[in-house]
Image (cartoon, rainbow, N blue to C red):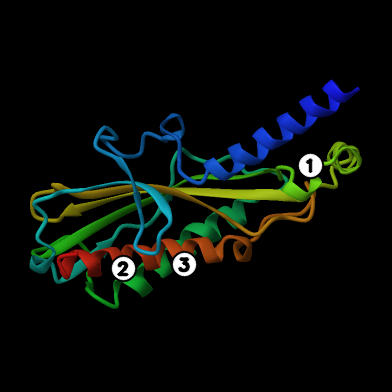
Amino acid sequence: MKTSVFNTLLCCTLLVLVGCASSRVDPSQYSGFLKDYSRLKPAESATGAPVMRWIDPDIRPGQYSRVYIEPSQFYPKPQPTAVISAQTLQSITRYFDAALKRELGKDLALAQGPGPGTIIVRPAITAVSTHNEGLKPYEVVPIALVAAAVNTASGGRDQSVDIATEAAFLDADSNRVLAQVVRKGAGKPLENDKTQLTLDDVKPVLDAWATDMRLSFERLKAGK
């Protein structure tokens, strides 16, 4: 009996640790949207979030005064589900576009297309998924484990929401890649596996990504 309880506690502890370690996109989950992933290295965003990133060491941010933001896309093409509708998916890309224009427009003039002194931002949403939440530390006790297992089996457990992005930044004149980033975030948990995902559930993540892109450019321009 003691061995069984120990094994259960060990498994649940591992689940918690895996959940904590999954805040950075694993290379096995790269979508293929970016042309070259080999240069990506673990890093922190301007606000301290874990990312995989590469920045051209020869970049001269001061030579850019305009930004052209290509319409964001899903890559690969998503399949709507009962929880994630086609309408929600469309609203996510539209909002991401607006957030990028709002934030990057604070530092650079928004361009209608490529041109001199322009950075092209090429963004993609590479994953939107929901799944059963991992067990919380306070649930790692035998009685709570039984209750949690029953709740999960009945479909009543909270659903975690994951969303990921990949983006490339290019020089509009030469089409040279200036930077690349891969990252993911967690939306608001859904009440259960029947609750539909809405744009509001992932808005904070999209806003944070756009803000980090602006802050990263500002830091580069300041030589930090």
- Relative depth, front residue between 14 and 155: 14
Mark 3 lies on a secondary structure that is helix
Q: Is residue 84 visible?
A: no
Sooner in the amino-acid sequence: mark 3 or mark 1? 1
Number of other residues with Cα within 10 Å of mark 3, as a class: few under 14, some 14 to 19, many 20 or more: some
Q: Is residue 206 visible?
A: yes
Residue of label 3: 207
Give the image location of residue 164, x and y in percent. Answer: 48, 48
Q: Quadrant of residue 109?
A: bottom left
Q: CA distance from mark 1 to mark 2?
A: 41 Å
Give the image location of residue 31, x and y in percent. Answer: 42, 35
Sooner in the amino-acid sequence: mark 3 or mark 2? 3
Label disc, if present, on residue 214 of the rendered structure: 2
Residue of label 1: 140
Residue at 46% in and 33% down: 29
- Numbered-mark total: 3
Give the image location of residue 93, x and y in percent. Answer: 47, 57
Residue at 73% in and 35% down: 12
